[in-house]
Image (cartoon, rainbow, N blue to C red):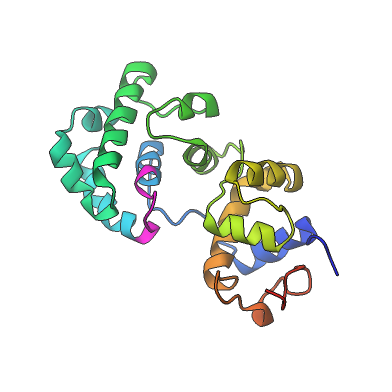
Amino acid sequence: MRDRAPVEETISRLKSAYPDARTALDWTTPLELLVATILSAQTTDVRVNLVTPNLFAKYPTAADYAGADPAELEEDIRQTGFFRNKAKSLRGMARALVEDHDGEVPRTMRELVALPGVGRKTANVVLGNAFSIDEGVVVDTHVRRLSNRLGFTTHDDPEKIERDLMQTVPKEDWTVFSHLLILHGRAVCKARKPDCEDCTLNDLCPSAFRV
């Protein structure tokens, strides 16, 4: 019985299974990715992608979000849920970009998490995907579940899970690792009924057939 799946073989197999692994959010600029990631809280990427085409066209710059009418912006993002808080975060984030960063999205963890509405998870998404900077590992519900099942962590707290993964996963794979686990969690290793029989990791995973 394994205590932990071999991480390099796990990553290799998942890369073969999901060769185009990337964020499911649609974006073309760092600002668009930052906005989309803020909107993705407590909702699905699919729903965010329904809202963002019109949103990105209407608010192409940080100054546009900073100067947006609060009620109008709330209506523009209503479908993503928690729209009042998200609109407040977007306007605050955008004001900070305009005032402190010349309207540009910064490229460091310290500067990103200082922005209103931006936590470490959001910052990791932006750094890893927009700038190819592997600063940490994004931990969402799929990453949390699969990391425990694979034996890479025994924690439930996202910060503790991230620390474990940063010690286990090669740094150059930190960004893609999250994408791979998210895709595998959605397709195969589901929360209620994982399909261990058809899983490419079933001979590596310590939880296989016992979940």
Q: Give the quadrant of residue 59.
A: top left
Q: Position of residue 28 (x, y in %)?
A: 38, 45
Q: Is residue 63 above or below residue 190?
A: above
Task: Report x, y in % for residue 103.
Answer: 33, 24
Q: Nearer the viewer, residue 108 or 86?
A: 86
| Snapshot quadrant of residue 35 | top left
Quadrant (top left/top right/bottom left/bottom right) for the N terminus: bottom right
Tally of numbered discs? 0
Tell me if 189 is positioned left or right of 172 in this view.
Answer: left
Residue toward you, 93 or 163? 163
Identify which residue, 200 or 119, lies in the foreground. 119
For image coordinates 30% across by 28% down, the residue present is: 92
Relative placement, left or right, of 190 versus 59 is right
**Residue 96 shown left or right of residue 132 in the figure:** left
| Quarter of the image that includes the C terminus | bottom right
Which residue range is magenta in the image? 38-46
Q: Is residue 13 above or below residue 123?
A: below
Q: Is residue 104 visible?
A: yes
Is residue 44 magenta-colored? Answer: yes
Furthest toward the bottom, the residue is: 197
The spot of residue 11 in percent (x, y) is 70, 59
Q: Is residue 128 magenta?
A: no
The answer to whether residue 180 shows anywhere in this view is no
Residue at position x 47%, y 29% in the image: 112
Where does residue 175 sit, x and y in percent of width and height?
Answer: 59, 47
Instruction: Please give the name of the residue rendered at 58% of the width and 36% of the height, measured from the top-left corner.
Output: 133
